[in-house]
Image: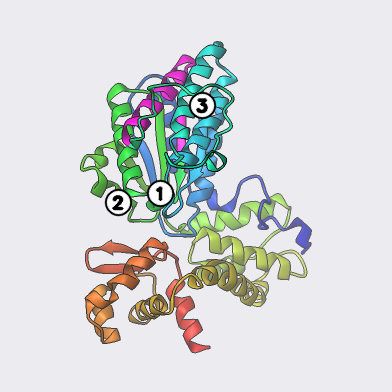
Amino acid sequence: MDPIRNPFAPGAGQRPPELAGRERELHAFEVVLQRVARGRPERSLILTGLRGVGKTVLLGELRAMAIRHGWGAGKIEARPDAELRRPLSAALHRAIRDLAVRHRAPDRVEEVLGVLKAFALRANKDDAKLRDRWQPGIDVPAAQGRADSGDIEIDLVELFTDVAELAADVGTGAVILIDEMQDLKAADVSALCAACHELSQSGSPLVVVGAGLPHVPAVLSASKSYSERLFRYARIDRLDRQDADRAVLAPIEREEAGIEPEALDALFDASGGYPYFIQAYAKAAWDAAPADPITVEDVRVAAPEAEQELAVGFFGSRYERATPAEREYLLAMAELTQGRDEGAGTSDIAVYLGRKPSSLSPARDNLMKKGLVYSAERGRIAFTVPHFGHYLLGRADD
């Protein structure tokens, strides 16, 4: 069929396939928006799941929902070994601009922007030369004595409080969305927990929505013992058969095309219900189909193309980040699990490689920092990427 019309191409369609089956999360956030806007207390939200389940797309949709409700909304992606202050300043700047459109007191907006600028400027090192000092692009004087102590925990509580009050002025709220939350530094996680705790105590209309790998709750709990009371956790997983079929059927039907039931069976078997894989296989099947409807033979013919694309862009890009010692560890995990999406015992890996567990700790820790594995439970380790074990065994056979 016409590749130009391919509804599974990146950016195509009005509703990405990754959002199929996420109605529960969307409805829950709708309730959060309404409760907070009415002055009711509500916990912040953490979305957790493996790579490829659509957390980032869902986060973007939640941001769009907030904006449609008149909220201020800013989104960032955490990066390993990078401090939170600078990207958070940019996200809050965007949220304040969203609120400023509805605010009737420009002086009040500028006052909060001054506090934000003071917070942002503390991202510069005290000994940084003038030419190396970052300027946040906020065209008001920096406030003095507010959110500028240099202690991220103190400063974030004060800044969040001021932004929340600005949102309350216009009868809405503010939301900060943080992707890849597991990559935040420990001090920044602690500061976020402290700020969310302060906001929950005061009922202020500002919430944090984070997304990250399955071990994010453990990261938060290790930072602040009370974190489980601050956040509502939602596990984002692969789609069940009904939702997976809908993720394929809806875009195809919008193009007034069709797909045979047997082809849907084949797509589900190939993708395992993971939204990223559904899109990859469905896109390839559409391009391979010579006519309407898409058949099971079209899926079969297209599968190598989809697998090659995944091998390069999804699996390969992550595998290339691992050192030889880390790749040895990954392959041992794959062989012990026989390529299945399940965890392996760290002691079993050591026995399999004929090594002492302590000698493998650096490789394991580095893989966790790189987001390739996570600790599913004490003494066990699992891939963050679905089907990664299967991919590794395929490489070993080449």
User: What amino acid does circle 3 point to?
Assistant: Trp
On residue 181, which mark appears?
A: 1
Q: Nearer the viewer, residue 374 or 126?
A: 126
Q: Quadrant of residue 375?
A: bottom left
Quick check: can you spot residue 397?
Answer: yes
Q: CA distance from mark 3 to mark 2?
A: 28 Å
Question: Is tag 3's residue or tag 2's residue first in the polypeptide sequence?
Answer: 3
Q: Chief secondary structure of the magenta span? A: helix
Q: What residue do we see at 28% from left, 85% from top?
A: 352
Compared with residue 4, is residue 313 higher up or lower down, i.e. above or below?
A: below
Q: Nearer the viewer, residue 10 or 107?
A: 107
Of badges 3 and 2, the one in the foreground is 2
Which residue is label 2 attached to?
219
Which residue is label 3 attached to?
71
Q: Which residues are magenta?
A: 153-176
Where is residue 166 shown, x and y percent of the image? 46, 19
Where is residue 250 shown, x and y percent of the image? 62, 51
If the image is split into quadrants, where does the N terminus sit?
Answer: bottom right
User: What amino acid does circle 1 point to?
Assistant: Met
Quick check: can you spot residue 20?
Answer: no
Question: Is tag 2's residue or tag 1's residue first in the polypeptide sequence?
Answer: 1
